Structures are given as structure tokens and as C-alpha cells.
Amino acid sequence: MKPKVILGIIAIVAFTSLLMYNFGESISTYTDFEKAKEMSNAHVPGTWDNSQDYGFSKETMQFTFYMIDESGESRKVIYPRPKPNNFEEADRLVVIGEMRGDVFFANEMLMKCPSKYNNADPSEYVKASES
């Protein structure tokens, strides 16, 4: 074989390997706070623990709150951005980040808010579409 062909095959294999490695690192499954201690980028779903204090600190520019994960464990979460507008209305939260000691440092936060259609009467949709 020609050296250019061999070099091209090596480059393709190296690029594909690098792509698969990075893709594998970006895939994360949901976990709880205990298992998140062993991970560098964990996705922890849960609900806001409204029995604990929460708020935004202007000194540190961080929003701090407590969250209960799916195993029932409540942990402090530090989020480096202001409190999202619909935080109190969220049914479910997913924090993405890492555990440092007993505190979860979130880089991102996803919120699932209740749908305005969940408790609606289905006959209302028919009436609205008929007019």
C-alpha cells in the first residue's frame, strides 16, 4: 500500500476513536447523591426541599438550595447563577455537576414545571376547537 493511504487510515481510526471517547464521556445516566460522589459529571434528579433555607448570595454570586434526590436524601446544592424565575413552581429538578464533600456543585440545572394542561377538562379542548 502507498504511505498516503496508510497515513489516511491511521488518521481516520484516530479521529473515530477520539470521537467515540468524547461521546462516551458526555453520556450520563441519572444517579443519586451517594453515587454522584464517584462521578465527575453527574445528573441528579430530584425535588426542591422547601423545608430548608434557600437564596441567592450577592457576595458569592451563587444560588444555594437543598434538593431531595430519588433515594430520599437531602443535600445542599450550589448553583453559580441567579435563581431561575420558575424555580418554586418546578415539579422536578435535574442538577448537573459534581459532589465535593457533602455539597453538590451544579454547573447546569434543568427544571420540569407543571403543565397547565394536566388538570384541564378535555371537553374544554373540544369547545375551543369548535368555535
Image (cartoon, rainbow, N blue to C red):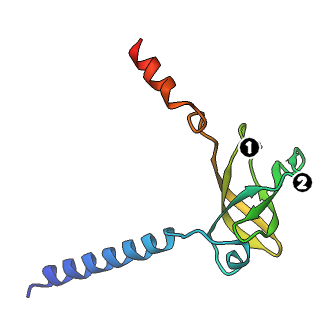
The residue positioned 51% from the left and 24% from the top of the image is: 124
Q: Nearer the viewer, residue 1 or 111?
A: 111
Question: Element type at marker 1?
Answer: loop
Q: Residue furthest bottom?
A: 1
**Horizontal relation, residue 15 to residue 64: left or right:** left
Residue 88 location (% of width, % of height): 77, 42
Residue 15 location (% of width, % of height): 32, 74
Q: Quadrant of residue 23?
A: bottom left
Q: Residue furthest top?
A: 131
Q: In which quarter of the image is the N terminus?
A: bottom left
The residue positioned 81% from the left and 50% from the top of the image is: 63
User: Callout 1 environment at 10 Å: few (<14), some (14 to 19), or many (20+)?
Assistant: some
| Residue that label 2 marks | 51
Residue 123 drawn above or below residue 74? above
User: Callout 2 environment at 10 Å: few (<14), some (14 to 19), or many (20+)?
Assistant: few
Q: Quadrant of the C terminus?
A: top left
Residue 111 location (% of width, % of height): 64, 48
The residue positioned 90% from the left and 48% from the top of the image is: 59
Amino acid type of the residue that numbered disc 1 sits on in the rendered structure: Phe
The disc, 1 or 2, on the residue closer to the chain's N-terminal end is 2
Q: Which of 77 and 59 is in front in this view?
A: 77
| Residue that label 1 marks | 87
Q: Residue furthest front?
A: 123
Question: Element type at marker 2?
Answer: loop
Residue 95 location (% of width, % of height): 67, 59
